[in-house]
Amino acid sequence: MVYLNFFKNPEYAQIFEGPLDIDTITMQIGATIPGTKFLPHKTVIILDEIQDAPNARTALKFFKEDGRYDVIGTGSLLGVQGYGKPPKSIPVGSETVITMYPLDFEEFLWANDIQPPVFKKLRECFEQVVSVPEALHNRMHQLLLQYTVVGGMPEVVQEFVNTHQMDTVFQLQESIVNSYRDDMVKYASASDKVRIRECFDSIPNQLAKENKKFQYSLIEKKGTAEKFAGSLQWIEDAGIITRCYNLHTTELPLEGNADKSVFKVYMNDIGLFVSMLEQGTQGDILRGNLLGYKGAIFENLAASILYKMKRKLFYFRKDSGLEIDFVIRHKGECTLMEVKAENGNAKSVKTILNHPEKYHVNRAIKFGNYNVGNTGSVLTLPLYMLMFMDER
């Protein structure tokens, strides 16, 4: 492996300022990093923080044409307006782009050494709609609460697995959130810097409301879409948040029935969202004392899990008070999905299911602090089984 980090060593970018033929590039890397060896069809070259060396990304085309070496380019916020330096030529057709996400709940379980037979048993209970054995059910619920607090940022998960010291976990999360704020200031245009940070910092307040529709007036008293829409888009492009759009009607195709002007906003990493709430919230979650933020926390948990499945998010709300947390395509049908921190009613679900001729829905899934069960058209599942909602 040959590793170049353009952020840590900005002088490495000069290697790609001249001719981009592969022999010249490998010769210059060898001269810059003594002891480097290139073995055809055995050496992999890693170009880290490639957004700081735009010509290195252009060179991917020539690496592919040459074919002797595999190359992995990694970059933070590639494609976000104002971040890094755009390449003179994007190597279309010569690179495979993979978007990396924070760890999902299943990966968090892997990190905590949960073994394959456990996943097999849980999947069987999910598919056969039978109760999970009580001891396993309780353990999985405990791990889900830990994931809710820790989240999926790799460094944070590794610290948790190594030490189980929540103080250092919280410090790492705070550092990441602060680095987001620093990046907003560093890379955004001058006119957007303050607005982007204000949008970002408003997210906990947006989700604390009973009606979680994103409101620009919560950013500032006279805030408007015209003033803040671009800033919110910057945060979304950066992979920090995702939007959940309101539906005109509960009917497939969901994308075609969405109102793009009415939406909720969720953080893509549940642990970072919780870290932005008032101090002590993490301890409350681990003890089961969920209090006022419980709806926002577990809705955001569900949103982050669905987002990592590459699902677009939708919900349904009417001024009459009818509201469904999420509406998804599941097993080819439009399906209502409610998320409860604890046991709770789903009055809106019953109303919609009782009028299939009006709402075109026959199925619903309710996630909460209970075991697997089935009540008529409503499937009830424990919150940790959100990880199995990958079937469209």
Image (cartoon, helix red, strand yellow):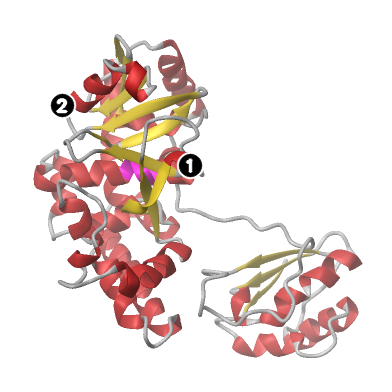
Tag 1: amino acid:
Glu
Left or right of 117: which side holds 27? right
Residue furthest front in the image: 358
Residue 37 in the image, given as x and y percentages of width and height: 81, 73
Observer-nearest of 348 and 280: 348
Q: Position of residue 49 (x, y in %)?
A: 58, 74
Q: Nearer the viewer, residue 42 or 262?
A: 262
Which region is colored magenta? Answer: 301-305
255 left or right, relative to 216 = right
Q: Residues within 10 Å of mark 2 (few under 14, many from 20)?
A: few
Q: List x then y, in percent, for residue 323.
A: 23, 35
Q: Is residue 39 something one can see in this rendering? A: yes
> Label 2 belongs to which residue?
344
| Residue ID at (49%, 21%) | 120
Give the CA separation, mark 2 to mark 1.
29 Å
In the rendered view, tell whether residue 338 sits above or below residue 46: above
Q: Residue at x 30, y 74 (%)?
A: 197
Whether 233 is among the magenta residues is no
Pointer 1 local density, CA inside 10 Å: few below 14, some 14–19, many at least 20? some
Q: How many marks?
A: 2
Point out which mark residue 255 bears. Answer: 1
Residue 358: image location, x then y, percent: 33, 22
Comparing 365 with 112, the one in front is: 365
Do the numbered discs 2 and 1 sit on residues whose CB atoms are within 8 Å?
no
Q: Tell me if residue 62 comes above or below residue 104 in the rendering.
A: below
